[in-house]
Image (cartoon, grey):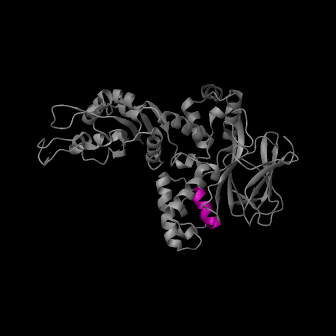
Amino acid sequence: MARGRTITKTGERRRAHDAAKPFLTILLQCDRPLQPGARFCIGDTEAVSIGRADALCAKLESDVLEIGIPDQRVSSAHLRLECVLGAWMAEDAGSKNGTLIGGRRITRERLSDGEILELGNTFLLFRAALRAHNTPTLLDGRDLRPEADGLATLSPAFASELERLRAVAASPVPVLLRGESGAGKEVLAAAVHRLSGRRGPFQPVNCGAIPPNLIESNLFGHRRGAFSGAVDDQPGLVRGAHRGTLLLDEIGDLPLPAQAALLRVLQEDEVLPVGAARPVKVDLRVVAATHQDLDALVAERRFRPDLLARLSGYVCQVPPLRERREDFSLIVAALLAKLGATDATFSADAARLLLSYEWPLNVRELEKCLASAVALARGERITSEHLPASVSAAPAAPAPDQRRRDELITQLRAHRGNVSAVARAMGKARAQVQRWLRRFRIDPFAFRR
């Protein structure tokens, strides 16, 4: 590549392979939180220089990737990253406001995977090795043009999952969304409906919110006089999704008798209302969602295996917020826009707390946190005093066991991402290795060639 070439847009420079590469991602800009962040691939150079610029940019100068960030508190030459013997070193370039890693001011320090770098009012996430397909040097969040809400991401792993979901959405294949409460399963279900092109409505049903004695009549409808209080015919929620998409949220809470009736609907494309003698044809696409382990429920005979097989046409694992930190800026920007908080800003201490918190209730919890903080700040800068006690009082996320993590990465490289082989080499159970992978947020597929 010729020196001095500026790389600013998504499609201008692409990689041909899926090799694991190091990345920097803008997690939050305190003075510009409605900007959706950006991701930089730094794997094609051995040195990176970061400084202030009028606009977000990245260019290669004399074999150094120069990254420009529009932040007045960032010095023109603020930070230099350099790959030394396979490890990335961060060195402050004599900046006016200093460089912090994990809240500590540094001069020169080795970077660990998952470190958060603080430059002025900008927070960046360093990832040592992520597998990404045809990734540009700079992916600006403003350049993402999702076909539906919930489909924008700066996380390479989640981007691959969403790409498969897009492909499945246009087919009649049932979709099962697995993930923790508040992770955004209903948003993705609505996206599947939009991409499906089906002309009927999107009908969400919370299976856990319907009283047990009313489940079948609510879902499948009833005829007048079928039971006490049935004063007229009701089509039910399933028929309400005719020619559209039926979302069965918290499907694990559905009682066994209702599961049997639902299985008939999926097998025969017809529904039998309570009290009716003849079934009614129905045309619908089914998306199910759950935070429960349905396989465990099947083993406990609390969920029908044949129904699970019917629902599992395509299974999408929706990651919790703590496992898709690359999307923090995207999500915060969308939530603030939804709240109408177009002039919101954050103090550095508030940003540190938001980025170190684990968010056990996921995006739903973050939305409530931001709503209360905006209300309490009354148009002023959001500080730690405006955050809920659960966030402001939470201990910082523990630093990873660097020695264990380094050993794990060494074995993954030696065995090309084969988790079973790594477990044997380390003399550990495969389940234990999987727990370490989740803890250190390491993708074993990134080490496969």
The image shows residue 416 at horizontal and vertical percentages of 68, 28
- Whether residue 332 is situated above or below residue 85 in the rendered picture: below
Count of numbered labels shown in the rendering? 0
Quarter that holds the C terminus: top right
404 in magenta? no
Q: Is residue 437 left or right of residue 203?
A: right
Question: Most prominent secondary structure in the magenta stretch?
Answer: helix
The residue segment tinted magenta is 346-356
The image shows residue 279 at horizontal and vertical percentages of 21, 31
Where residue 404 sits, quadrant-wise, is: top right
Measuring 55% from the left and 70% from the top, which residue is drawn there? 385
Out of 125 and 191, give the one closest to the viewer: 191
- Whether residue 223 is situated above or below residue 387 in the rendered picture: above
Farthest front residue in view: 199
Q: Answer whether residue 393 is visible to the viewer in this image.
A: no
349 in magenta? yes
The image shows residue 303 at horizontal and vertical percentages of 33, 33
Q: Answer whether residue 87 is visible to the viewer in this image.
A: yes
The image shows residue 409 at horizontal and vertical percentages of 69, 36
Quarter that holds the N terminus: top right
Q: Is residue 361 left or right of residue 26?
A: left
